[in-house]
């Protein structure tokens, strides 16, 4: 998943950036609107906003549950983002070992279960649910000091129940895929989990249209999430046992640090290359990305040299590196274009397009169990 634009950083926990997306403000606005439309006063609005804040604290704890469990298996997390519909922990990958994936997926809801159990110890839950329905409705009509923790207890319980719905890529769907992966190969398991996820997403969407707009958003999110991850797992399967050298471009234009930008523009206009490796004597000095080239021209720096605009913070790939690992790096980087270097000598470059072409043209004949490979990638 790419870095989400329009997010405000809240700080870091064990090196993982916690950020909140601007659309979170819409949720606060919605809460205020609901309170006002029910005729509640200012105090009720403050309690409600406070409740949303604390609840999203629990959501962060949930995501940290995933992230810190993944860290135990050597998988990093780029960031945790709070959206109005919940949190997203952007793990670099999911463990392919089903047992590990199971534990990473379970860890999130488990955190909310623990929070709910702890609250159960201090909240007189029995007193609340033994009230008759009319009285209970009155007690819970607005959030206040007397029912705040009961609300929080219920919400955490809801988080557990909601997340274990087997709608891939929600936690329950991951749990399901991990369980299925113990019985069949991961690609089949993903297909089944993704199919079920899309069915549930459709249900969320339709049900949400009638009753709850947030459910509509979650439906859309789950639907495309399931589709995206299904495609990704299929592609990863196709890339297995292939190396960067098999897919990389070797016929590329290499720039020199002192080339003027105007020459690069001529190259861009006359060819199809977008990003360029900058090298002197086949030693990589940097990469000139098209976005930076465009920005330079916009800022009136069209007469600059390549070395002034190029990005020097480049981590080249090695030709023997597994293509599946390169694929993850390319997908998770902002620009998605990497030089390939062997013994400090530039030997090629690779980007997402390359890998897509490789999947289309090269990977099918080598696959032994061809019947399992769907042709819709
Ligand atoms: Zn989760």
Image (cartoon, rainbow, N blue to C red):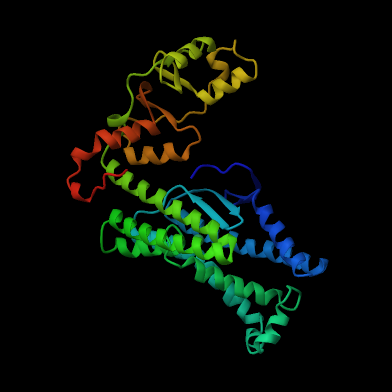
User: Residue at position x 66%, y 80% from top?
Assistant: 122
Asked whether, in this view, residue 92 is left or right of residue 214, the answer is left
Residue 35 seen in the figure: yes
The image shows a total of numbered marks equal to 0
Viewer-side residue, 242 vs 268 = 268
Return the residue nearer the eye: 147 or 36. 36
x%, y% of residue 278? 46, 18
Residue 132: quarter of image = bottom right
Please state the horizontal and vertical placement of residue 234, each as a whole percent of the image: 31, 47
Judge whether 296 appears above or below 38 on screen: above
Vertical placement of residue 272 versus 326, above or below: above
Between residue 357 and residue 58, name the one nearer to us: 357
Query: Could you tell me which residue is drawn at 39 percent across and 34 percent down?
Result: 352
Residue farthest front in this picture: 210
Residue 60's place in the image compared with 340, above or below, is below
For residue 237, side relative to residue 126 (left or right): left
- Residue extending farthest right: 42
Is residue 260 something that shows in the picture? no
Q: Can you tell which quarter of the image residue 277 is in?
A: top left
Q: Position of residue 253 (x, y in %)?
A: 40, 16
Place residue 323 in its image quadrant: top left
| Left/right of residue 78 with respect to residue 373 in the rendered view | right
Which residue is found at the position 30% from the left and 55% from the top? 186
Instruction: Report x, y in % for residue 329.
Output: 42, 38
Q: Residue at x 50, y 71 (%)?
A: 161
Q: Quadrant of the C terminus?
A: top left
């Amino acid at each position: 998943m790419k870095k989400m634009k329009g997010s405000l950083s809240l700080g870091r926990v064990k090196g993982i950036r916690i950020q909140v997306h601007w659309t979170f403000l819409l949720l606060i606005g919605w809460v205020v609107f609901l309170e006002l439309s029910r005729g509640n006063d200012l105090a009720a609005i403050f309690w409600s906003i406070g409740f949303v804040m604390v609840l999203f604290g629990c959501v962060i704890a949930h995501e940290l549950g995933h992230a810190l469990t993944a860290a135990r298996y050597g998988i990093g997390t780029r960031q945790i983002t709070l959206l109005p519909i919940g949190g997203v922990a952007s793990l670099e990958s999911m463990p392919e070992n089903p047992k590990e994936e199971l534990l990473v997926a379970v860890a999130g809801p488990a955190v909310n279960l623990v929070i709910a159990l702890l609250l159960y110890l201090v909240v007189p839950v029995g007193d609340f649910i033994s009230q008759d329905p009319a009285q209970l409705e009155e007690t819970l009509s607005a959030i206040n000091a007397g029912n705040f923790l009961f609300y929080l207890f219920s919400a955490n319980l809801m988080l557990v129940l909601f997340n274990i719905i087997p709608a891939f890529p929600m936690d329950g769907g991951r749990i399901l895929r991990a369980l299925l992966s113990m019985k069949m190969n991961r690609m089949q398991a993903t297909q089944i989990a993704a199919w079920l996820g899309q069915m549930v997403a459709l249900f969320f969407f339709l049900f949400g249209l009638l009753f709850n707009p947030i459910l509509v958003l979650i439906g859309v999110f789950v639907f495309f999430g399931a589709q995206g991850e299904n495609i990704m797992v299929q592609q990863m399967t196709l890339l297995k046992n292939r190396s960067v050298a098999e897919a990389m471009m070797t016929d590329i234009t290499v720039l020199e640090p002192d080339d003027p930008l105007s020459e690069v523009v001529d190259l861009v206009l006359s060819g199809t290359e977008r990003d360029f490796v900058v090298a002197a004597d086949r030693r990589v000095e940097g990469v000139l990305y098209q976005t930076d080239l465009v920005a330079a021209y916009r800022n009136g720096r069209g007469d600059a040299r390549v070395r002034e605009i190029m990005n020097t913070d480049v981590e080249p790939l090695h030709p023997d590196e597994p293509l599946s690992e390169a694929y993850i790096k390319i997908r998770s980087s902002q620009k998605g274009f990497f030089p390939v270097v062997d013994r400090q000598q530039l030997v090629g470059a690779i980007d997402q397009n390359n890998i897509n072409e490789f999947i289309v043209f090269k990977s099918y004949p080598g696959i032994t169990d061809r019947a399992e490979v769907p042709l819709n990638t």
